[in-house]
Amino acid sequence: MEQSLQHRRFLMWLVASFSLICLLAGCINYVIDPYGIFGTPRIDGLNARKPAAGERVRTSKPYMATALRPVTVIAGNSRPELGLDPLSSCWQDADQPVFNTGIPGASFHMQTQYAKHALSAGGGKQVLLALDFVDFLENTQAKPTAAPPDWVSLSRTYAGRLNIRDEAVSEWQRFGTRAKDKLGSLFSLNTLADSLQTITQQSLPHSTDRRADGFNPGRDYEAIIRNEGQHVLFQQKNAELSTRLARPALGLFISGQDYSESFESLKAFLSWAKREKVTVRLFVNPYHADYLNIIQAAGLWPVLEDWKRQITQIAGDFNAPLWDFNTLDAYSSEEPPGRGQRGKSIRWYWEPAHYKREMGELMLAKMLDKPCVSEDLTTLPGTRLNSENLEAHLAALRSQLPGTTASVPNAARQE
């Protein structure tokens, strides 16, 4: 009897200790909130910076957007996430709060879904949506797909985090996804380790971060530039892009189809925005000259031009302004520091595919038509595209790339 009583006491002590440890871990994870999911107040020196959040943006950004309730949304992939600052002086009072919902590595459909959620969260009035050439590339030899795409299947893994007007998600799916996200972020040893990392890295000047408004200040790039030099970033990204764009059979449409998931996603988003009375500004992300040269070397320049024709037509159909920031000028042609020049950096780009906040300021000034930069607005990069000026615009950029063959519209080719 005495031994049985001792066993029960031991089990009760064990259960109580385990519960207390779980509760303590949960409290720490909630207070530190390393991924920004709970919206816990950010305290300098404790949890203001979120070095672990960069790996969880697909999970955390919907909750961050819900907490901020933005009026203006910046949407796209990692390029605008690094380049367009919600705290820019170009925004007017009526534009705020501004949220950057850029998602690195996401499909274009996911980018638009996250934008819809952020706009729905705060009754948003306008969105700046980035269009990126590589997000629209297809394997032309792939198996034909259904038209229209199966939107429900495409967003099944993350739809439970989103609350989009006119797009119903089952309450069970929403409950299950959010419970998994939040309970997993509370009672997890991985989260606890990230919480401790968050605390210890607060004083490090180059620890990575995601601000509460969704912006990535690029501190991890700063660390590489300081320790290894910016030439490493250019070297690595150029090699990555060359490999990616050298894949065979890249194009805009699968053979035999005249539609694609990304183009249909753009049309669906613009239709949704029109119904919701949301103002849309579309823009083509700027690339460093190295990136444009790699596109040319891969034989994809005609595809790039056809892509711009497609998006210009779609933008015109929905009366949405479309800005193209692909240029070859002093902004895009800066020569990065050479090997051994650590700590030095060019002004406008982190590496060929990602532009800095400084370039983003020029873009915002141009798109919003605001004198919020010291440069003359008329000389800034960026051209508003329409059916009247498109071909001249394409020809001007093409002429600056030695060796680029002429590209003509598909209709002309068929003639």
Image (spheres, grey):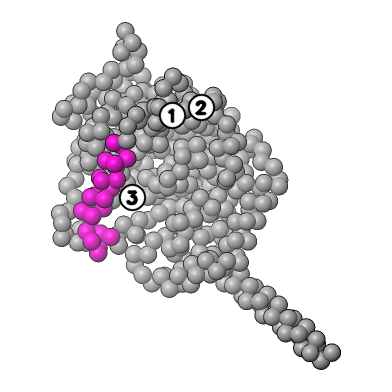
Image vertical order of residue 377 relative to residue 32, above or below = above
Question: Circle 2 is placed at which residue position?
Answer: 145
Q: In front here: 65 or 59?
A: 59
Instruction: Please tell me whether mark 1 or mark 3 is closer to you in this view.
Output: 1
Q: Is residue 343 left or right of residue 197?
A: left
The N terminus appears in which quarter of the rendering? Answer: bottom right
**Measured Cα–Cα span from mark 1 to mark 2:** 9 Å
- Percent x, y of residue 351: 27, 48
Q: What's the residue type where badge 1 is placed?
A: Ala
Quarter residue 119 falls in: top right
Give me the disc on residue 357. Answer: 3
Question: Which residue is farthest bottom?
Answer: 2
Residue 297 visible within the image: yes
Question: Circle 1 is placed at which residue position?
Answer: 142
Residue 126 visible within the image: no
Q: What's the residue type where badge 2 is placed?
A: Thr
Region rendered in magenta: 224-246
Tag 3, which secondary structure? helix
